[in-house]
Amino acid sequence: MATKMCYNRGCGREYNLRDVEAECVFHPGAPFFHDAYKGWSCCQNKSTDFTTFLNMTGCTTGKHSNIKPVEPEQITGNLKKEDSPVEVEMRAPIAEALPRPPYTTTLKRLTPTVAASLKDQLKKLEITKSGDTSSSETRMGESCKNNGCKNTYQGDEVDYTNCKHHPGIPVFHEGMKYWSCCQRKTSEFQQFLDQEGCDIGTCTWTRADGKEGVVNCRYDWHQTATHVTVAIYAKKYDPNVSYVEVNPVRLKTHIYFPQEKGSFNLDLELKGLISVEEASVGMFGTKLEIKMKKGESISWQKLEVPRIVEESDKKKADIVEDTSCQVDALDLDDFDLAPQRFQLSEDAKTKKY
């Protein structure tokens, strides 16, 4: 008797080809495996055990079949989910860097916005000057103008040659505070103020008239995606004399302090390009703030780049280098230049027997 294997899923039994009325119980759907479950798509029967999955009774009755069913390429997960089209993202091409104009490009002076707090400071300063009738004489109790010195004026008969002060400038970086001259770092501001000076000199009560001194100011900068902001921390400066000038690659600042009869100058070659037309400056009671829009949408690693040494400075450096390499003339008569002939001693020579 001719028998065949039934290829209906879930049946797998042999049947007689002549037995047309034989009943077959099978799964017309396809198996699926998802999230540790095994089941059939036709009856949604599922189990986590593989043996239980194989022994699941078919959900449909019909005739046996000796034709192998067509296996799907992949049936996993939700069978009703339609394939979504694959989206390919195209990255925008990298824009070429803009040409960098020369450092000597004409500077444009910015029109500042002066805050009322700065104007009030100058008014109080003018009132103090007008009420001081003995401005040429040093007042009793006047503090020394040297950084770090704690001495006060107590009359001409006192010796002021023991002025312990800091000739350098204050530095505030990454939470640490110190003087550039002695590098004694601390995180406490009061300890920084109480540091004893590292140099000894004579106390200074006032600046000499007619001579413009140099005032040291602390400045900082930060950036966003579109702008770079430079803040110079200063008080009681004259907005009528102070100015800020820029070109696409340069920032030049002059801040004048009438009380100290000195100024702070900052001249930088910027790391990136800026838009001169969209730059602005604000003069406030505690700082001068310069806001510059970037010419390119890139991040600046630092604010400035080192200036290239001018040709005249290079020549001066070469001259200094040449003079430092000069040596005194040598007298050759002091040296014995006669050739010397080296010979073996009698003991070192091979003796012939």
Image (cartoon, rainbow, N blue to C red):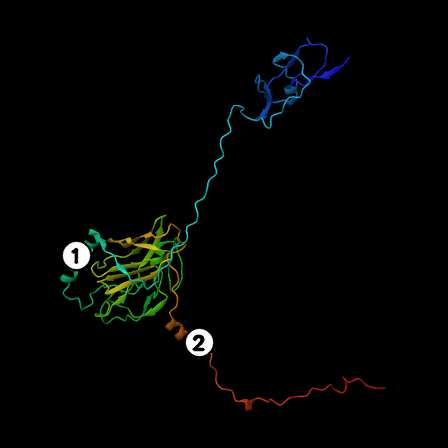
Residue 183, labelled with which disc?
none
Up the image or down, 347 lies above or below 177; here it is: below
Up the image or down, 12 lies above or below 191; here it is: above
The residue under label 2 is: 321
Q: Nearer the viewer, mark 1 or mark 2?
A: 2
Up the image or down, 346 lies above or below 132; here it is: below
Left or right: 62, with 203 as reference point = right
Cβ atoms at labels 1 and 2 below 8 Å apart: no
- Residue 353's spot in the image, x, y percent? 85, 86
Considering the image in quadrants, where does the N terminus appear? top right
Figure quadrant of residue 206: bottom left
Nearer-the-camera pick, 3 or 11: 3
- Residue 257's spot in the image, x, y percent? 24, 62
Identity of the amino acid at label 2?
A: Glu
**Which residue appears at 21% of the width and 54% of the height?**
118
Describe the element under mark 2 as helix, strand or loop: helix
Figure quadrant of residue 98: bottom left
The residue under label 1 is: 123
Q: Give the total number of marks visible in the rendering.
A: 2
Nearer-the-camera pick, 352 or 205: 352
Graded by Cα atoms within 10 Å as few (under 14), some (14 to 19) or many (20 or more), the crowding at tag 2 reads: few
Left or right: 274, with 51 as reference point = left
Give the distance between the C-alpha atoms of the residues marked 1 and 2, in whole angstroms: 53 Å
Identity of the amino acid at label 1?
A: Lys
- Residue 218's spot in the image, x, y percent? 32, 58
Graded by Cα atoms within 10 Å as few (under 14), some (14 to 19) or many (20 or more), the crowding at tag 1 reads: few
Left or right: 340, with 142 as reference point = right
